[in-house]
Image (cartoon, rainbow, N blue to C red):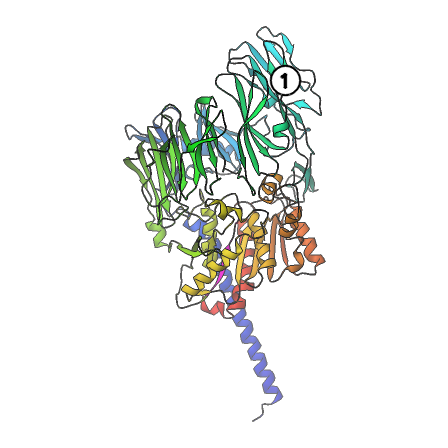
Amino acid sequence: MKLSHSLLLTCGAATLMASALFSAKASAQTAEQLQASIDLRKNWQGLTRDIAFPASWVPDTHQFYYRKTVAGGFAFIKENADSGEQQAAFDQALIAKGLSLAMAEPITALQLPFDNFWYDTDGISFYLHYEPWHCSLSEPQCAAIESNTRPIADGEVRDLRVPAANPLRPSPNGQLQAHIVDNNVELLDKQGKRILLSQDGTEGHFYDAESLQWSPDSRYLLALKVVPGYPRYVTRIQSSPQDQLQPKTIEQLYPKPGDIIDVEQPVLFDRQTGQQWPIDRASFANGYLLENVHWRADSQSFAFIYTERGHQRSKLIEVSVKNAQPRTVVDEQTNTFIDQWGGSYAHEVNGLGKEIIWLSERDGWAQLYLMDGATGKIKHKITQGEWPVRRVVHVDDSQRQIWFAASGVNKGEDPYFLHYYRINFDGSGFTELTKAPANHHLSFSSDKQFFVDNYSRVDLPNIMTLNKADGSVVRTVAKGNIDLLSAAGFKAPEVFVAKGRDGNSDIWGLIVKPQNFDPNQRYPVIENIYAGPHDSFVPKDFWPFGYHSGGDKVIGMQALANLGFIVVQMDGMGTKNRSKAFHDVAWKNLSDSGFPDRILWHQAAAKKYPWYNIDNGVGIYGASAGGQSTLSALLFHADFYRVGVAYAGCYDNRMDKMSWNEQWMGWPVDDSYLRASSVVNAAKLQGELLIIYGEQDSNVDPSSSLRLVDALINADKDFDLLAVPGGEHSVGRSTGPIDYVQRRQFMFFIKHLQQATTPNWNTQH
């Protein structure tokens, strides 16, 4: 039977009409679900009680204070450890009023915009949008703290156009003050008489005012004489300033890999004889950084830590006042990198340098050693085991004891869980201070008689306890309650572990499912990636709210999952806080980003769970180094990753900050930088890509994103781009138009991953 032409047209019109009606209905449904996901953070924000974090102590007292969740927001509490008496840490209504006036926006008492603070003599201080602020406790008055100092970042050259701070440095005996005048060192006595100690300082070879240090006996003065390096500036265009129609330009001092940096030379002055000794730089000739410059307690020598350019050698160097000759006490070397991002530590026992507590990864794990200050040799290991020391908290020289944090000590636990310990200098008396199988954050009273332990897991809300020095619990201070949050549909993410590329290392991660998860349905998978070698990144604490351990990012994972995805995060090889070999994978190899481990992890999850659908490729998103990794996924692993959203990426390590990139990629700049570059490898792009960046990014040069755009255009590659006027490094994640940027990210995954994988998605959700 043949249909008439008119009937075919009628059927076609009806089909088109039905399709249009369905499409409109589906789009409305998608928009509604999208907005619900974007609103998840604000809707869940007030649904916990007594989640307490962080804890701090009033110096030289037994009073500690903390913030905890209450109905309507957060309360700041101060508590006496001896009596248990509690009171408000400060008048929150007064602070809210002061901030409202200062910021010209409404601030409420239970929604103060900071997590932690410290007491000053006349009020409290805190950080707000990364800037220091101060508020009075007697009147509604708050203001940003003006500082006349400009910190110099690791490896940064000095900006000679910005006047350096030039404070008067009083001698310990109070008889003299030192400062810099016309690039030279000058002394003032109590009568105001001026004594010029140096005459060789010039604008191109000057004495640094902030480096001046008196010996404890007031006889000697130490200064650093500086030859400034190349002052590289990044120029940014502020296209849409709020205070004028026309655009502005902003310059920022921003050293990049390979740039010539400051040369610092210690100079010793003997006030008694008038002698001046420039210290021979032969043993520290290629300095990236001279830090922890300090006098010994007996005034007979000073010492400093020298990090060689390239981060493969670090020394403890001492200089005796008898001959002004430098001597290398400890010489740490490696074929890869010495981790300067919180992975190094040195302590001179009794401030004399005869014994040194030294953190080293020389045996494959970060461990503490007791070094002989006379010979530079190891006296013995203090800690030992296949686990890393993460942080030294306190050293008691008189009792010869060390308090420190470590992870991986307790077999069977997540190897990233922080626990705290005490040990004697000789390695005996190893004592665990924290017992619960969870991630611990400790804060000690000044006299170390008490500590506050705040512990949690992703499936265990925060518990805060007051403990004695031996670890025994005095009382529970706060225990988190999530009844309201659970009633709203909260479910903890699932911890998942699979073997990495070596067949031995466990790769730990999280799986976040939709709130309306159906185990009989298959869900496309999206990975949240950050693979920076300076840390590990999968949250270990109770996670919904972002005041610590990445919670704000993880609630974004839940919001995305609620749209019908499985969202995951894991720490692959090349990240920190495991063995040296695990970490070394990143050396000159940032494009690796742990992908061989990540792909195996995904495959193991798909093998275990039928709802884990990676058949049509995996989505991926990340910011900063995570943005670079997102591009690497689509460039080098396009057979596995298919859709990516990259935020504020450092896509070519030659374009990014010196301090971070030379640490992991080495110096001098070589072809490893080219191999890792998304710009150089742009022609390899496959899949769907959305690039997002803020034009005022002060962390990663915005030109890094535009360099990538240029390379992709030249390679005739299609991609999407979102440039946010005025946006900073965290734009769309914790600052800027968060809802708009998040909506663009979510819609990108819906369009290119979900709808392409599941054509009838709108009818299934």
Describe residue 147's horizontal placement relative to residue 469 as left or right: right
- Between residue 120 and residue 452, name the one nearer to us: 452
Instruction: Using the rendered view, name the quadrant where residue 117 is placed.
Output: top left
Dot 1, crowdedness within 10 Å: few (<14), some or many (≥20)? some
Instruction: Using the rendered view, name the quadrant where residue 212 is placed.
Output: top right
Circle 1 sits on which residue? 277
Observer able to see residue 168: no
The correct choice, above or below, for 437 with respect to 566 in the image is: above
What span is colored magenta in the figure?
A: 523-532
Magenta region, mostly helix, strand or loop? strand
Residue 531 painted magenta:
yes
Observer able to see residue 714: yes
Q: Quadrant of the C terminus?
A: bottom left
Residue 526 painted magenta:
yes
Measured as percent of width and height from the top left, residue 133 is found at 51, 31
The correct choice, above or below, for 44 with respect to 278 in the image is: below
Measured as percent of width and height from the top left, residue 231 is found at 69, 34
